[in-house]
Image: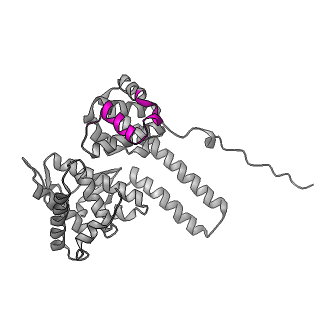
Amino acid sequence: MPETLHPAPKDPAFHKLPPQSIEAEESILSAILIDNSTLMDILEILSADDFYKTAHKITFAAIETLYAKSEPVDLVTLSNILREKDELEKIGGAAYLSSMVDALPDVANAGHYGEIVHDKSVKRRLIVAAQRILTTCSMDHGEAREAVESAQRDVYHIAEDTLGGGLLLNDYLSSLTAGDEKRLALQRLARWIRHIHSRQIWQRDFKSRNVLFHNGRYHMLDLDSVRLEPRIGTARRMMNLAQLNASVSNAITLKDRLRFFHFYIAGARWPRNRRRAAYQKIWEISRGKNTAGYDLDLDKLFKSKFSN
């Protein structure tokens, strides 16, 4: 009598809600609305994609946009930008935003709430990677070596972001293959540098080898070259940007470099001619430090279209 084959029991883990903490997400958003000074620490830990609830994801993305424009984050500005994006009703309207302020979280614990949300986000990413590995192996296409390499890439980025010893800037940027990932990385890099400069911190040798990416954050190396100045003027800011531009990996295209500069000056409201003059100066300094790849027509490059 032929043996009866029974299907393997379904794993209950695949029928549970993914790891998430709605309470921690709400507390973070409430803390930001109550005290904007918590925002910089939160931005070093989280991005919008780390939030599980769609309304929280949309809200935090809007907060990131306001911050990039150097605008305050409050009920009025947040409601306005969400309305402009036709997303206010998607999150529950202005009443939902007001309810966040009413929650009154302990603002001093905002960093801890951020760590909780980040931890849940990492676990969800691991689940997605595991499901992708399972699907790839179940389809039984290609060689096992290709499946192993694909799995290694999936888990590598998560491990580096959470447990690894970090990557120097060029190694980190070169590891990013998706265009959206690279643009987000450049935006966060520009925002980090702008924050350093706003605190009047000056790095005399701001090259890519002196920037480390670890645990989702950028860190400055070679602290012997770091100075706290009474004021950092435009010339010194341009010098730092030129140092970075001349030493950054060729994995960063010319248009991506323009995007980075756009992210850096976001909120400054410079007129177009001043933006172009500043970037022209950065490019001239870059050419003097590294002639390879900088012999180009900047006017033609500026006329080319690129999305923000």
Q: Give the residue at the far right of this rendering.
A: 1
Q: Please give left or right for residue 188 compared with residue 282 in the image.
A: right
- The N terminus - image quarter: bottom right
**Residue 16, placed above or below residue 173:** above
Residue nearest the observer in this picture, 308 or 253:
308
Residue in the picture at 27% in, 34% down: 36
**Residue 6, placed above or below residue 52:** below
Q: Is residue 88 magenta?
A: yes
- The C terminus - image quarter: bottom left
> Residue 212: horizontal and vertical position, in percent?
28, 57
Residue in the picture at 37% in, 59% down: 182
Whether residue 231 is visible to the viewer of this picture, yes or no, is: yes
Residue nearest the observer in this picture, 20 or 186:
186
Residue in the picture at 22% in, 68% down: 246
**Residue 19, placed above or below residue 258:** above
What's drawn in magenta, residue-wise?
72-94
Q: Dominant secondary structure of the magenta stretch?
A: helix
